[in-house]
Image (cartoon, rainbow, N blue to C red):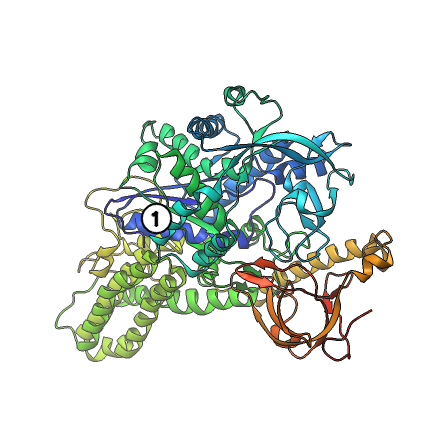
């Protein structure tokens, strides 16, 4: 829980790669949860610095540049402003959005690197690495594909197998191939700096033990890495794009700095520091950055997606520890992945909702960005993967924003203008229902705050909407349309209390739907309220906890007439159908283009080089029955299988969780490679391999047999 004794709070959101636009998966993973949390904290009066920026030094940038025959500078200068501007249109309230190609970032990264080198933190290793003789360059991890030594997947990258999740190095791949030229790489000697994570593991374990309150998905992934044992990680590369290794550091070791860069996983998180420096400089207080990074009273929180857990929970903290001058993160609330219409997001297939397209398509809608903010906030993948659908989006907008929140506001304002001349009526001799509603209003800020403080954003959104729902129920039960004639004071009490609830919602909904909340405050004439965006507030401004008390004075006149438009417009079926059709058409087009470029035979992998009979005989293939199957915790693609191979039962991990339900495998008679060396993954030992056939579309089909368990397959 972010509840430091200090009011100073530093929040970061994962730096997006500047090699493509932002989609809703990115928003749900790191950016929207961070923005809601930060806006809430500003309304509480916290001293907040919210920092982000474009990650521009990654290998992905270089890969796209080479693929498109462009320069890396051209790539980042195309996407950085697009990402920055669309974040702004979406309502992201960054204090500063920087970029890691800036001079400040280069200097900050080199200085950080220099300090660690002077403290002899690094290991220097001279070893053979893969080199592309045709491209005349060493190959970074992602420039190499080959066969995973663990699961046999033939398209594994040099840093990780996307099928079984194993962490790899390029030299571990079998049959490696350069993605740049398709050449077979050669081994060539080079020297690099390594961060000795293995040596630092005890210190990291002690620190992680201090944070049992972190999310289970975060702690689970960290523990799986601890169980495997941390290994030294190279933090320099021989590639033509990145922050250059400082010449003085190279000279200190008798090496040449030319052609060597600091690897992106080391430089990217330092981007949080360099961007904070640039923010402080822009404020005219250039030394203020250190208050947020080097004062022990600061609370540091990283919002990330689950694919960044290890970098932010082990590697960056190790760097900060060894430097010695920086605070460590108080929490790293990582979200899982967001699926789309029941399928995994796929940018290559066009199966994605791009932020810029959404903003363009819904620009004419009242509070258009807020509609997506609310729908995503109510669907965040906080503890497990979640699914976004356009029909659910419509239901959230129409059924909750319009019918509950918007309808309550519209009914209340209509009554006050029609029957009370636009003035807040007095509250006299309140009924039990009036007092109960005011009590609920008084409890709401604390209930919503508790959820935000525990990083349970969906619950915070639910609790906020619950107040609007309670307001609607109260309005219906007190029936002001009847009491207006039979008991005018009871009617006045209903409208007074309802207006106070509207005022409270104008504050409590500010993090989620900031545009609509601001519009509501204007309609209520509610002024002098804290802002949830960067900027100073008057000392007497009302804040988060004031939303539990009446904010409107009896007798004040509201500025907006009763015929004002509803706060939210409903989404038509035709708009949803258009979005679904666009999504499917784009995916169909991508699939069509892919299939039109090759026949079915071309989609199949090429035949491998011939082997001898002795090579085949070395495989011990056995028939077996799968007796149990279950997902592997924190491993999206892995299932843990229990397989009876006649002589014994084996535990085998299979990377098919995204395609095959565990129950569909139980009872199958399959073929097992029984003499593979055991391999540990995610804390489980895999004692063999279940053979799978991969169809041209990537679908896995188990290879089955009717033979008795334990039979030799020849």
As drawn, is 681 to the left or to the right of 379? right
- Pick whichever, 433 or 13, lies toward us: 13
Element type where label 1 sits in the image:
loop
The residue sitting at 71% across, 38% down in the picture is: 67
As drawn, is 201 to the left or to the right of 358? left
How far from the left and from the top, in percent, is residue 498? 26, 67
Would residue 434 be visible to someone looking at this image?
yes
The residue sitting at 38% across, 51% down in the picture is: 208
Residue beneath label 1, please? 330
Pick the quarter of the image with the C terminus: bottom right
How far from the left and from the top, in percent, is residue 572? 55, 65
How far from the left and from the top, in percent, is residue 290? 33, 32
Would residue 575 be visible to someone looking at this image?
no
Pick the quarter of the image with the N terminus: bottom left
- Pick whichever, 268 or 582, lies toward us: 268
How far from the left and from the top, in percent, is residue 254? 56, 20
* Mark 1 burial class by Cα count in 10 Å: few <14, some 14-19, many 20+: some
The residue sitting at 50% across, 40% down in the picture is: 84
């Amino acid at each position: 829980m972010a509840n430091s004794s200090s009011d100073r709070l530093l929040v970061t959101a994962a730096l997006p790669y500047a090699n493509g636009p932002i989609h809703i998966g990115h928003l749900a993973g790191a950016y929207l949860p961070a923005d809601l949390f930060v806006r809430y904290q500003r309304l509480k009066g916290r001293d907040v610095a919210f920092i982000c920026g474009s990650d521009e030094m990654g290998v992905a940038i270089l890969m796209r540049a080479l693929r498109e025959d462009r320069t890396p500078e051209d790539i980042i200068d195309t996407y950085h402003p697009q990402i920055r501007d669309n974040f702004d249109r979406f309502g992201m309230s960054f204090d500063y959005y920087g970029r890691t190609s800036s001079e400040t970032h280069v200097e900050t990264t080199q200085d950080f690197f220099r300090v660690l080198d002077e403290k002899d933190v690094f290991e220097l290793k001279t070893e053979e690495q893969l080199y592309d003789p045709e491209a005349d360059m060493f190959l970074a991890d992602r420039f190499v594909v080959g066969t995973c030594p663990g699961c046999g997947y033939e398209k594994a990258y040099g840093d990780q197998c996307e099928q079984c999740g194993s962490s790899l190095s390029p030299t571990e791949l079998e049959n490696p191939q350069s993605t740049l030229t398709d050449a077979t790489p050669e081994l060539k000697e080079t020297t690099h700096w390594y961060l000795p994570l293995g040596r630092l593991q005890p210190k990291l374990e002690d620190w992680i033990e201090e944070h049992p309150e972190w999310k289970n998905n975060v702690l689970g992934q960290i523990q799986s890495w601890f169980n495997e044992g941390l290994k030294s990680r190279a933090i320099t590369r021989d590639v033509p794009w990145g922050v250059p290794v400082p010449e003085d550091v190279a000279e200190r070791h008798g090496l040449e700095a030319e052609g060597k860069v600091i690897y992106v996983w080391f430089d990217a998180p330092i981007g949080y520091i360099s961007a904070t420096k640039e923010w402080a400089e822009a404020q005219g207080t250039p030394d203020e950055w250190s208050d947020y990074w080097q004062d022990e009273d600061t609370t540091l929180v990283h919002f990330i997606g689950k694919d960044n857990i290890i970098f932010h929970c082990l590697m960056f903290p190790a760097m900060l520890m060894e430097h010695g001058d920086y605070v460590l993160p108080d929490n790293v609330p990582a979200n899982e992945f967001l699926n789309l219409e029941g399928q995994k997001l796929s940018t290559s297939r066009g199966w994605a909702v791009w932020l810029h397209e959404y903003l363009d398509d819904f620009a004419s809608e009242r509070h258009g960005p807020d509609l997506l903010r609310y729908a995503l906030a109510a669907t965040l993948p906080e503890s497990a993967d979640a699914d976004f659908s356009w029909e659910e989006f419509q239901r959230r907008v129409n059924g909750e924003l319009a019918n509950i929140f918007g309808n309550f506001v519209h009914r209340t304002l209509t009554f006050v203008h029609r029957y009370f001349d636009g003035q807040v009526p007095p509250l006299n001799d309140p009924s039990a229902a009036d007092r109960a509603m005011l009590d609920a209003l008084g409890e709401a800020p604390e209930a919503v705050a508790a959820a935000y403080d525990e990083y349970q954003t969906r619950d915070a959104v639910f609790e906020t909407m619950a107040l609007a729902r309670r307001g609607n129920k109260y309005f219906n039960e007190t029936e002001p349309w009847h009491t207006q004639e039979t008991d005018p004071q009871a009617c006045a009490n209903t409208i007074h209390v309802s207006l106070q609830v509207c005022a409270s919602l104008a504050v409590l909904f500010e993090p989620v739907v900031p545009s609509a909340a601001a519009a509501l405050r204007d309609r209520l004439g509610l002024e002098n309220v804290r802002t949830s965006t960067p900027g100073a507030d008057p000392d007497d401004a009302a804040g988060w906890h004031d939303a539990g008390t009446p904010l409107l004075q009896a007798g004040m006149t509201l500025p907006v007439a009763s015929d004002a438009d509803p706060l939210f417009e409903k989404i038509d079926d035709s708009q949803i159908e258009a979005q679904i059709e666009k999504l499917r058409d784009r995916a169909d087009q991508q699939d069509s283009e892919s299939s039109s470029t090759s026949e079915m035979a071309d989609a199949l992998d090429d035949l491998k080089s011939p082997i001898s009979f002795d090579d085949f005989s070395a495989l011990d293939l056995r028939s077996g029955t799968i007796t149990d199957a279950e997902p592997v915790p924190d491993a999206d693609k892995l299932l843990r299988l229990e397989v009876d191979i006649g002589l014994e039962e084996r535990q085998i991990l299979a990377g098919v969780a995204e395609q095959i339900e565990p129950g569909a495998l139980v009872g199958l008679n399959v073929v097992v490679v029984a003499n593979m060396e055991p391999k540990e993954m995610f804390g489980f030992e895999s004692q063999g391999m279940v053979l799978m056939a991969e169809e041209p579309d990537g679908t896995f089909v188990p290879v089955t047999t009717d033979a008795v368990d334990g039979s030799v397959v020849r």
